[in-house]
Amino acid sequence: MNKNVVVVGAGINGLIAAHYLRRAGLGVTLIERAAQVGGACISEVATVEGHSHKYALGASVLGLMQDFIFQETGLADRLQTYVPEQAKRVHFPDASTSAWIYRDPAQLQRELADKWGERGDAEGFRADEAKVVDYLQEGYRAAVPPSLDEAKLRLGDALTRLWITGSAADLLDHYFTAERSKIYMAMTVTESGPVSLQEPYSAFTMPLMDSGSIFGGYYGFVKEGIWRITEELAQINRERGVDVRLGCKVEGVDPGRGTLHYQQAGQGHAVAFDHLVFATDPLSAARLTGDSGMVHKVEGKRTLGTSGKLNLFFRKPVRWKEASDHPAGDTVFRFIFSVESIADFERSTLRVTSGETDYSPGFIQIYCEGASMRQMGMVEPFDRLAVFFKNMALNQRGEALPEVEAAVKAKVMSLIANPQDCAWARLLAPRDLQQLFLFPGGNIDHTVLTGGQTFFERQFSADPAQQFYQFGSWSNVSYCGAAAYPCGSIAGTPGYMCAQQLIRHMA
Ligand SMILES: Cc1cc2nc3c(=O)[nH]c(=O)nc-3n(C[C@H](O)[C@H](O)[C@H](O)COP(=O)(O)OP(=O)(O)OC[C@H]3O[C@@H](n4cnc5c(N)ncnc54)[C@H](O)[C@@H]3O)c2cc1C
């Protein structure tokens, strides 16, 4: 294939798309606005008490990537990873109800019954979810766009209704009886944005978020930090002959003529393409094509994000009050809920949508990045925790919300025996995500994972049946950023599926 493809955006999706297109023999130019690759998967350096230390500014944990992508790209040969294998720890306001989330479904069933009075079917939940996940993973590998007919054929009507088209509330009521089990499982539904548990298709977020295969549906870490994925992938791409151009802000494209215009160091440049792939947020893509209908359509999407991220450094390794004896017990994922009922969970999720409050406590997810680095043999000046939490409004930047930072920190520190060792913190709010990473409404998936924006509707094509990843009605333009199926995250699945569709089309 003697054709030239230009990919705009060197985040995970642009890098993966460029990789597979180049492997197929296409000429590939990858154009990135920033001075570095990575998009929302980058590091930043904080200098604290005389030590300079890197931390993950955007994404921190790896898990939704498909193992074949990790292997085929060559990342597996160059990066070391670590996955905490012990049960996760869940805390509720009533401390006596803290529970362990075991990997083994039968052990989990017993723990939930014991701690939360669960009388439902946790084992059945996991078994049915595994069927849906298998189906999704097969689709990713074959790069087959999602379709409800196909889902019904493979899973049957009942599972499709429960796990794909239905509401999270119905799914949870089907398998669980205890409020706390439902709250814990509902956590993934709101990770992307403020989705009501009653909304159609809200159930689908659960199997979707467990459909990574790199760690069998679990989440883990990359040695040094997750940003090594995008850094290394850019290096692999360069070695394979991808022309990576940094510091180049695309200012307009003319799909009719097959020309793209960009600015680099104050100079205007043009580059010709046979095919153009946008791996940016969808609003930038729409604006760059100058297609007002497309801009209008994208502006009508739900893009509100409600996640805050707090990075913390500690002078000495964090000591957990409830530590396990396991040698890697300090790497356990911990979740703190501020609500005890599913109704309060729902209220808290939806309260920030109107902007009536800056922060409505929901849940806090604690990822022990520094402890995991120690498991991979690293010696660092600070221990680090990556803390994701809900629910923040889009109103303010993190630095303007010291009271939110203090409230979240206090909850995290209540689990830690040496809070006095905390030396540094940085809060990012959805407004920061909007400004730092160009995420239109601060949503980490670029658009919310909700009805009308998920499964077969997670695309921007005028002809999704034939060209799922096409952008609008331009047959020579595709879109594969985080707002395309299946979703965002450090997975690159949209980039892979889009590249495969394009390769088939151009062959
Ligand atoms: C705070 C935070 C925490 C997160 N945590 C996790 C996590 O722990 N695990 C996980 O899996 N995911 C996480 N995510 C989500 C994940 O980071 C994103 O879904 C993913 O990085 C999106 O990748 P992408 O390639 O689609 O887009 P992006 O990473 O947004 O990349 C798009 C690229 O396009 C470039 N671009 C835009 N406009 C132009 C232009 N005009 N010209 C040239 N270039 C342009 C941008 O500069 C950018 O580099 C997190 C996100 C954030 C913000």
Image (tube, rainbow, N blue to C red):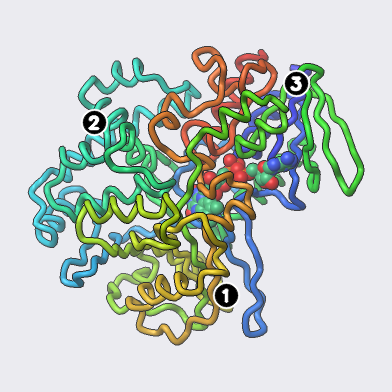
Q: Quadrant of the C terminus?
A: top right
| Residue 22 visible here | yes
Q: Quadrant of the N terminus?
A: top right
Q: Earlier in the sequence, mark 1 or mark 2?
A: 2
Task: Give the spatial CA distance, label 1 vs label 2.
Answer: 46 Å
- For image coordinates 38% across by 38% down, the residue present is 208
Quarter location, residue 389: bottom left
- For image coordinates 78% across by 18% down, the residue present is 2
| Residue 228 visible here | no
* Circle on res. 167: none
Under mark 2, the amino acid is Leu
Q: Earlier in the sequence, mark 1 or mark 3?
A: 3
236 or 450: nearer the eye?
A: 450
Q: Residues within 10 Å of mark 1 (few under 14, many from 20)?
A: some
Q: Is residue 273 above or below residue 92?
A: above
User: Residue 165, how many percent across, how many down?
Assistant: 30, 28
| Left or right: 365 in relation to 300 | left
Task: Give the spatial CA distance, label 2 vs label 3.
Answer: 41 Å
Would you say the residues marked 2 and 3 are in contact, meaning their CB atoms lie under 8 Å apart? Answer: no
Under mark 3, the amino acid is Pro
| Left or right: 325 in relation to 142 | left
Q: Is residue 455 above or below residue 501?
A: below
- For image coordinates 64% across by 72% down, the residue present is 46
